[in-house]
Amino acid sequence: MKANPECLCCKKEIPKERPRQCPRCGHEFQGNGWDGIDAHWRAKHEHYMSYEKFWASLCSEHKS
């Protein structure tokens, strides 16, 4: 499937397979996919974009 130009992970060419990876800093999340992304994003990247906007920007393949 073609990359979604609005999805931050697609823009950074982050693989859709696990482990999930932060598109801003490359941090790899352990466990079940995005476990801990909300705390990580709010602590490190909230100045760039709100967590809500980041999560809404992700394509369905990167969210799952």
Image: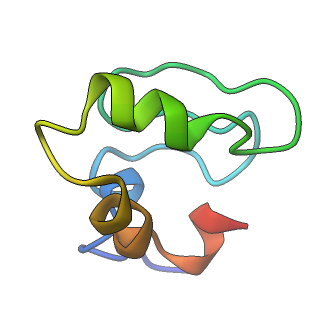
Q: Residue at x 79, y 24 (%)?
A: 30
Q: Is residue 46 above or below residue 40?
A: below
User: How far across and down, in percent of the image, does residue 8 sit?
Assistant: 31, 56
Q: Residue at x 24, y 54 (%)?
A: 50
Q: How many labels were placed on the picture?
A: 0
Q: Residue at x 52, y 43 (%)?
A: 38
Q: Is residue 8 above or below residue 23?
A: below
User: How far across and down, in percent of the image, does residue 17 sit?
Assistant: 73, 48
User: How far across and down, in percent of the image, does residue 5 sit?
Assistant: 25, 73
Q: Is residue 11 above or below residue 44?
A: below
Q: Is residue 36 left or right of residue 49?
A: right
Query: In the figure, residue 21 lies in which quadrant?
Result: top right
Residue that sits furthest to the right in the current view: 31
Q: Is residue 38 left or right of residue 45?
A: right
The answer to whether residue 23 is visible is: yes
Q: Residue at x 52, y 33 (%)?
A: 39
Q: Is residue 32 left or right of residue 59?
A: right
**Closer to us: 1 or 50:** 50
Q: Quadrant of the N terminus?
A: bottom right
Query: In the figure, residue 23 lies in which quadrant?
Result: top left
**Closer to us: 49 or 24:** 49
